[in-house]
Amino acid sequence: MGRRRRAAIPWLAGALVLAMLAFAGVVIARRLEAPLPPVHVGITVDRSAVLSPGAPPLIPVPGDGAFQLDSDLDGLLAARNEHSVRPIGSVAKIMTALTVLEAHPLQGAEAGPILTMTQSDVGFYRQALAEQGSTVPVAVGERLSERDLLLALLLPSANNAADTLSVWVAGDRSPFVAMLNDHARALGMTQTHFDDASGYSPMTVSTAADLVILARAALQNAQLAGLAATRSASLPDGTLLRNLDALLDTQPGWLGVKTGWTPQAGGCLMFAAHRSFPNAPPVTVFGAVLGQPPLAVADPGHPELGGALAAARAAVDTALYSYVVVDPARVSPALHGDITSPWGARASAAVRASASRPLPIRIGTPIALAVTLRQPASGPLAGEVLGSVSGRLRGTTVATWSLIARQTLPAPSLWWRLTHAQ
């Protein structure tokens, strides 16, 4: 009996060893087959990048009066006394034209309704003559279209055309002036007051900042933009109308918008211009300059407007040529960091352009950069996308770059897998 018990002990010991070996094999197999713990992708980029290095040229501003220049891309570019309330002269006629066109829109090249001039309209002409204001002659019974009167209003800046249009739209001049002030408030022109429709009154006042608001609104009306940029036109009786904005003849991309002058207001100009680029959107600037002295060199025919024209031209030229076209994707953001694993392996990351389009950027303008990461479940392969960098300008994403692994992350050793429980 004792002999049989002693013979069973080695057998049990062997079975136990085999069981332990089998268990160990299962444990080893599970550890070798277990998913690896996640790696850590730690990458940062600078908060911003300058796509066109350098400092933009200083925009010249006049030493007298008031001035503001805005860009449709970057907002305010330059200003001086932009909130100073001043008489604005015939610049006021842009609001008159905008109000007329909103009451009686024109389509395409249509002339619009025909107005027959009355003795009242002749009286407006004679009053403007007596005041030594700008005029276009009219006669009783003469037939002029809405377009004719708007061209007379905007090109030679006829004060009597403003009064005729006022009565046509509102029945009298006073209620039309009330419409102008309502329109100004609706546009957010908080420091503007109209006392008349022509701007001859020194109590028709505004600021350079408010007039930039009006310039933007005027150019959004396609009909008004076209009328204001017209260099010359003829009335039915052959009267030639010439635009007093001489820069329409000399400055590429000049859009108008309206000249103004009175002894109290000095030389005034509301203006806009744009610059086109191949394969990129254009850039447009809007501005207003008030209270400028005469300058015969800029416009010998109208020296009273010369200072305003010269100031606007110098500012616009400098501003528009401070923009360059850049393809953001061709500029790789500088990044810092790497990919690390719990088993000590490391790899680096790089950026690769994903999507962008060329766009005009003012020299020295930064774009904001932000990183979005994707934490891979295990070691990434070479070329695997780990996330992206986005570049935002003016509140819009203008470029994205993919973050990719430069190398395949080395796998852990068998010993590490065996000694690190999952």
Image (cartoon, grey):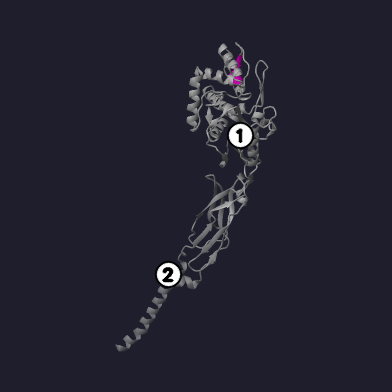
Up-down relation of residue 363 to residue 420 (above or below):
above
Q: x, y percentage for residue 173?
A: 51, 19
Q: Considering the image in quadrants, where does the C terminus appear?
A: bottom left
Q: x, y percentage for residue 279?
A: 64, 42
Quadrant location of residue 96?
top right
Which residues fall within the magenta stretch?
Answer: 143-149
- Say which label, 2 or 1, has the lower sequence index: 1
How packed mark 2 is, by other alpha carbons closer than 10 Å (few <14, some 14-19, many 20 or more), is few
Quadrant location of residue 234?
top right
Up-down relation of residue 206 to residue 27 (above or below):
above
392 part of magenta stretch: no
Q: Residue at x 39, y 76 (%)?
A: 20
Compute the Cα span from label 2 to label 1: 71 Å
Up-down relation of residue 46 to residue 261 (above or below):
below
- Residue underneath mark 1: 272
How packed mark 1 is, by other alpha carbons closer than 10 Å (few <14, some 14-19, many 20 or more), is many
